[in-house]
Image: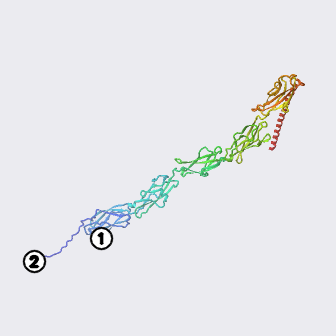
Amino acid sequence: MSSSMEICVIKVEIKDLNDNAPSFPAAQIELEISEAASPGTRIPLDSAYDPDSGSFGVQTYELTPNELFGLEIKTRGDGSRFAELVVEKSLDRETQSHYSFRITALDGGDPPHLGTVGLSIKVTDSNDNNPVFGESTYSVSVPENSPPNTPVIRLNASDPDEGTNGQVVYSFYGYVNDRTRELFQIDPHSGLVTVTGALDYEEGHVYELDVQAKDLGPNSIPAHCKVTVSVLDTNDNPPVINLLSVNSELVEVSESAPPGYVIALVRVSDRDSGLNGRVQCRLLGNVPFRLQEYESFSTILVDGRLDREQHDQYNLTIQARDGGVPMLQSAKSFTVRITDENDNHPHFSKPYYQVIVQENNTPGAYLLSVSARDPDLGLNGSVSYQIVPSQVRDMPVFTYVSINPNSGDIYALRSFNHEQTKAFEFKVLAKDGGLPSLQSNATVRVIILDVNDNTPVITAPPLINGTAEVYIPRNSGIGYLVTVVKADDYDEGENGRVTYDMTEGDRGFFEIDQVNGEVRTTRTFSESSKASYELIVVAHDHGKTSLSASALVLIYLSPALDAQESMGSVNLSLIFIIALGSIAGILFVTMIFVAIKCKRDNKEIRTYNCR
């Protein structure tokens, strides 16, 4: 036997058994899918591994049933199978941002083996949401005079996006004017609107703020809203008083202005509203004026009698109060000057003046002054004087006295004679310079005092060259009435009271009664007595400076005359005195009769003139 070797090939086929289950490389699959992914979007998934071969390898994948995602199984070139996640519907992160599923890998065994893995899907945000305000318009109110940083409103625009896509910033946009931007500001992050300027209801009581909210994401679309801010009125404005018809706060009114005469127009305003701006006015003080209120203005009227001479100026104050709480008020003062009218007559200091002047005054001598006052102004109060025409002893009064028209001084134009005119009266007229002129008058009485300017005049017995001759019986007894010495003195009182005396001559034989001037014998005469006697009789008055007159009385003794004749002489003297008295009485009655007749004639003349 020979040795030999023969080689043969033996093929052994090992048949696979489905003894392995599919497995995933990781216990969890983490995916991020943008919410912007459109339906049909595919995302490859990690494949499962199964060491078995053939049909015992991974044949398919299954996903937890849902509406949003699906699986699409694909085969590679080596025959292995893999799965892709398919987005079936639109995603919305804001609705659901996380999903958890189970993926199952199945082989082809019978029964198949399987392996599972968790699938976590995070839906990432895209800027697909715009900010949204809760309201399109907001209405808020804020009091005027609110201090800076006072909150007005906090705006909130929601954006469900994440990150910068959901980060909202606020701002005013172009429709907000500069004035509004000065008064309000908005915090870009918080949306808080605050006051930054001085709010004044009277300057503006409604402001509109156009606000936009915008996220910081790409392609951001802003949201808008309108904020209407109403400024609430507070009583921060006092009433303002304007005098429409007063220049320089002075008005002139005639004192003759009647009640109801309008002296000024008043307009009162209050920039506040409602009760805060409702104003009531009144006129302060007790003055002859009143305030009449109308709907849009007021008038100040005369409400009493004006008299410049009593009150030439008034200071009026108008007070205005509003209806706010607390109440505000203001006042306005102006001056009313009362202008003069010629409404006052000149008024003499007294209605009756009397002056006493001695006779024999110097022509041109000052007598007295009259004074009249007129309280009016200017020419209305300028007083001039004149004497009212009249008669004094049938002569014009202008020949007796004159008056200074400006001062009222009265002067004598002549030397007065008491024995001719003891007193006289005249009227002085005072008139002002107004148009028409007003006047008044006063009575002036001039009393002329007697001075001892008249020397007694011896009227009895009859004198020839200052000498009188008297005859008496030689047998005249003691006390025989020789004669009566009579003297007239035109002065009055003591100046005209005459007494008699004997100064020289044969005074031892005769005596004279100082009062009645009777010259009587003081002794008897005899045949041896001388035939004639001389007496110097003196008649003198009793003035301070006595004046006198003297006469020489020659007394002759006549034997032819007896006592009876002497008695007859006495009777003749008595008859002479009685006759003089009778004549004086008749003259007095005649004067009374003439005076009554003249008065009656004057009355008839006046009656005729009146017709």
Where does the image place residue 260, in percent across and percent down from the top left? 65, 48
| Vertical comparison of 246 with 125: above or below | above
Whether residue 306 is visible: no
* Residue 412 falls left or right of residue 115: right
| Vertical comparison of 592 with 532: above or below | below
- Numbered badge on residue 146: none
Which residue is painted at 41% across and 64% down in the image? Answer: 219
Where does the image place residue 542, in percent across and percent down from the top left? 76, 31
* Residue 47 falls left or right of residue 348: left
Secondary element type, mark 1: loop
Location of residue 370 by image quarter? top right
* Residue 408 falls left or right of residue 518: left
| Vertical comparison of 74 with 524: above or below | below
Please give the residue where the numbered disc 2 appears in the rendered image. 2
CB of mark 1 within 8 Å of CB of mark 2? Answer: no
Q: Amino acid at mark 2?
A: Ser
Please give the residue where the numbered disc 1 appears in the rendered image. 76
Viewer-side residue, 540 vs 37:
540
- Viewport quadrant of the C terminus: top right
Which residue is painted at 43% across and 63% down in the image? Answer: 221
Which circle's residue, 1 or 2, is located before the other in the chain?
2
Q: Name the residue at the bottom extreme.
A: 2
Viewer-side residue, 478 vs 365:
478
Which residue is painted at 81% across and 24% down in the image? Answer: 508
Where does the image place residue 366, in percent across and percent down from the top left? 72, 40
Q: Name the residue at the right extreme.
A: 560
| Vertical comparison of 385 with 205: above or below | above
Location of residue 212 by image quarter? bottom left
